[in-house]
Amino acid sequence: MAHHGVNTYGARLRRRAHRARVALRRTGVDYFRGGTSDRLALAGLLLTIPAIVCGTVLDPVWCSPAALVLPIVAGGLLLRPASLLALYAAAAGGLIVESAILGPYGEGPARVTPGTVLVVAACGLFGLLIAQFRARVGVPWRRGGTMLFDLRERLRVQSALPRLPRGWHREMALRPAGGQSFSGDFVVAARTHGGRTLEVVLTDVSGKGMDAASRSLLLSGAFGGLLGSLPPHGFLPAANGYLLRQNWDEGFATSIHLVLDLDSGDYELFSAGHLPALQLHSGTGRWEEKDGDGPLLGVYDGAEFHPVKGTLHPGDVLMLFTDGLVEAADRDLAEGIDRLTGEADRCVPGGFEGVAWHLIEAVAKDVNDDRALLLISRPA
């Protein structure tokens, strides 16, 4: 009986310990995301100020009076503006205590000089500006970085191409301008009609890099919702209407919409001012430009988009890309396309698996523009 009581007591202890761990983890996650009060951070930073003051009084050479900028900088990242003012008041009190105990600043190098006061005050001013900016945005710093990471991952997942049946190969490479994480080029794709049809939309938003990133994020979500919800001929008109409703100063975009029948290899290409696609015909070894008829997205209402049709036979390759891959200040578009097809011809003997990134590196490695390349092949 006593043995049973010991087991019951041990089980209660384990349950309590588990609840404590869960509560601590939840508190940590909520604090990281900015969903809790900053009182704990304020209390911790307030305790560091008397510790720094004591260290300065005892050994001012190793613990400089300017060390008070450390909790001030941390407070600028962790605290809300109201709490930050309380921390600043405590830091100012610490400086007064140090100056009173250490004596006039002219007696030695480890004294509270006017320069020390100016450094601490300047750091406090910058910290307050950062805290006020975060308060206006409404996103604490702990959550801000996480939100950007989540947005990047969601964009990456949304841009992933779906698996294709046996006998088909697809791959995509995307390289933003300046090595950044966000791009003005994006892809949305889905298999529709019971998986028998592959629909892919490659879009190039006006601008580049971070200038186009916010518009790209918004449009990729909207286009992802439209794709598959409308018949193929209705996608670009709906996307054009959506873009017009945004009333952006620089609101145009180019887009190309591929509708591919995975059973027969027949496809349609709808283009909205985008560069032509390139098809490699295995029988002749030649590249053919496939260019649909349609204006830029976001220019005028009532635009019409007329497709071009084709068929991918075994051994054929279809290549979609954005202008950053073939356009440059020192060459025209035709020269850029010739260079791209010339590099792609070198891949024919070994197949087109894993070559999308290599092609971008070969033809547009140092271009300061967003670059995207999509390859769909039908190995023989």
Image (cartoon, rainbow, N blue to C red):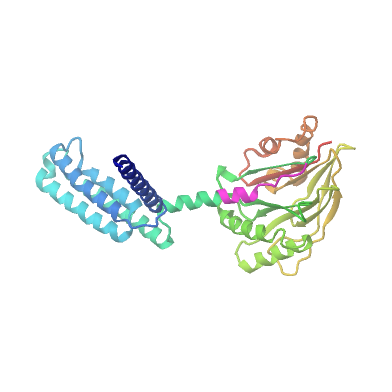
Left or right: 363 as drawn, with respect to 166: left
**Farthest residue toward the front?**
1
Range of residues picked out in magenta: 153-165
- Foreground of the two, 130 or 318: 318
Q: Is residue 244 visible?
A: yes
Tag count in the figure?
Answer: 0
Quadrant of the rendering where the N terminus is positioned: top left
**Which of the 4 image quarters holds residue 335?**
top right
Residue 272, horizontal then vertical, whole percent: 74, 58
Residue 50, horizontal then vertical, whole percent: 18, 47
Residue at 15% x, 51% y: name it: 96
Residue 177, horizontal then vertical, whole percent: 59, 45
Left or right: 88 as drawn, with respect to 11: left
**Which of the 4 image quarters holds residue 34?**
bottom left
- Foreground of the two, 210 or 198: 198
Residue at 19% x, 44% y: name it: 51
Residue at 85% x, 53% y: name it: 309
Residue 73, horizontal then vertical, whole percent: 31, 48
- Foreground of the two, 338 or 321: 321
Quadrant of the rendering where the C terminus is positioned: top right
- Foreground of the two, 295 or 215: 215
**Farthest residue toward the top?**
349
Q: Is residue 157 magenta?
A: yes
Q: Is residue 328 visible?
A: no
